[in-house]
Image: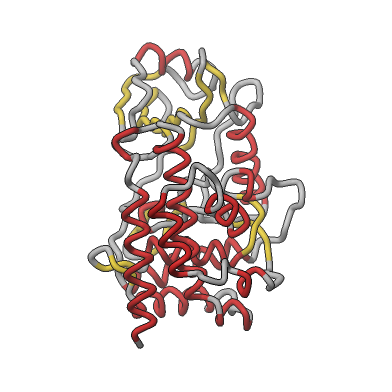
């Protein structure tokens, strides 16, 4: 899954020649990532993560790294800062590839649990407290909020099951949700629990800011809860409560955010489902995952009907 681009050791060595990181000694492909090829690399001077983008161009990668650099400037401790090339570039170019090099960090991807949800909630709220830099890209360049979802539902590309599930859950076409002026700032856009690393049951790092940008906090909260507050593949209100407790320790939710939290979780599922359709079904990045969006539709269906039975 994480090795779409089959990079040879001599090719990786040529990439590392762009950096002042010492001679490459060892490379290992990692089975991580959906839209990247990831490699663990050792050099004479250190331990690094080499990323090659499989579906983003150089400018898109650069905008992502600008967000990470800004977060480090603002002393956001949970993110990694990209290593610059000898020429001071945040993104390298090699043959037809573009990519990034990061320090390799140790940690354990957690499983869903109350403490996982609590810690990730705190981490996301800390991100949302960072002051806004209007020069950063909007989330809509790389991710999908309610405007993009509604346009897609009415497009010829929309699968029937996506449209039917959406209209079943949101017969008002999200009119009530969209009439609110949501608070905005820097959002992660894809903070599932498997995009984190923990150390001794404490959140260490948030990973994969590929869908980050300026956007509504309520969307980010919904996306994150929809992929974190899970037990046996189902969203549990008890884990949502743990997540919310951690989040509100840093940033209390606003009135409308509390009222529409369930909607936000469901929108989060449709947002990532649409991302998968665009990448895998329409874009054919990985045909084996073309129907992976269906799992998210099923989660939305189960959560919606469970909540409405109460």
Q: Please tell me whether residue 240 is drawn above or below residue 92 in the rendered image.
A: below
Residue furthest out toward the bottom? 310
Report the colour scheme.
secondary structure
Residue furthest out toward the right? 134
Indicate left or right for 267 with 151 as reference: left
Q: Position of residue 47 (x, y in %)?
A: 39, 33
Residue furthest out toward the left? 232
Q: Residue at x 46, y 56 (%)?
A: 163
Q: Please tell me whether residue 44 is drawn above or below residue 95 in the rendered image.
A: below
Q: Residue at x 46, y 62 (%)?
A: 166
267 or 155, nearer to the observer? 155
165 or 267, nearer to the observer? 165
Q: Position of residue 109 (x, y in %)?
A: 32, 53
| Quarter of the N terminus within the rendering | top left
280 or 189, nearer to the observer? 280
Q: Quadrant of residue 23?
A: top left
Q: Position of residue 134 (x, y in %)?
A: 76, 51
Indicate left or right for 89 with 111 as reference: right
Q: Residue at x 33, y 52 (%)?
A: 294
Total marks in image: 0
Indicate left or right for 234 with 162 as reference: left
| Quarter of the C terminus within the rendering | bottom left
Q: Position of residue 59 (x, y in %)?
A: 64, 30
Indicate left or right for 117 with 62 as reference: left
Q: Residue at x 45, y 31 (%)?
A: 51
């Amino acid at each position: 899954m994480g090795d779409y681009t089959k990079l040879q050791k001599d090719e990786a060595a040529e990439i590392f020649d762009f950096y002042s990181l010492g001679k490459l000694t060892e490379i290992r492909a990692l089975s991580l990532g959906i839209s990247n090829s990831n490699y663990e690399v050792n050099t004479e001077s250190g331990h690094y993560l080499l990323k090659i983008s499989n579906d983003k161009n150089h400018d898109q990668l650069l905008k992502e790294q600008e967000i990470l650099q800004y977060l480090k400037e603002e002393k956001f401790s949970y993110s990694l800062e990209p290593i610059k090339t000898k020429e001071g570039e945040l993104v390298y170019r090699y043959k037809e590839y573009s990519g990034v090099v990061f320090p390799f960090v140790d940690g354990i991807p957690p499983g869903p649990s109350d403490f996982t949800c609590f810690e990730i909630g705190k981490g996301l709220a800390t991100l949302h407290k960072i002051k806004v830099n209007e020069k950063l890209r909007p989330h809509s360049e790389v991710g999908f909020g309610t405007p993009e979802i509604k346009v897609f539902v009415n497009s010829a590309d929309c699968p029937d099951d996506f449209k039917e599930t959406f209209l079943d859950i949101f017969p008002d076409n999200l009119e009530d949700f969209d009439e609110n002026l949501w608070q905005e700032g820097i959002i992660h856009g894809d903070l599932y629990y498997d995009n984190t690393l923990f150390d001794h049951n404490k959140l260490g790092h948030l990973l994969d800011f590929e869908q980050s940008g300026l956007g509504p906090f309520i969307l980010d909260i919904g996306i994150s809860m929809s992929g974190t507050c899970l037990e046996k593949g189902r969203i549990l209100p008890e884990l949502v409560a743990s997540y919310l407790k951690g989040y509100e320790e840093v940033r209390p939710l606003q009135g409308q955010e509390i009222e529409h939290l369930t909607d936000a979780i469901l929108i989060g599922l449709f947002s990532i489902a649409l991302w998968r359709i665009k990448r895998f079904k329409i874009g054919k990045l990985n045909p084996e995952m073309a129907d992976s969006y269906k799992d998210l539709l099923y989660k939305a269906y189960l959560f919606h009907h469970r909540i409405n039975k109460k």
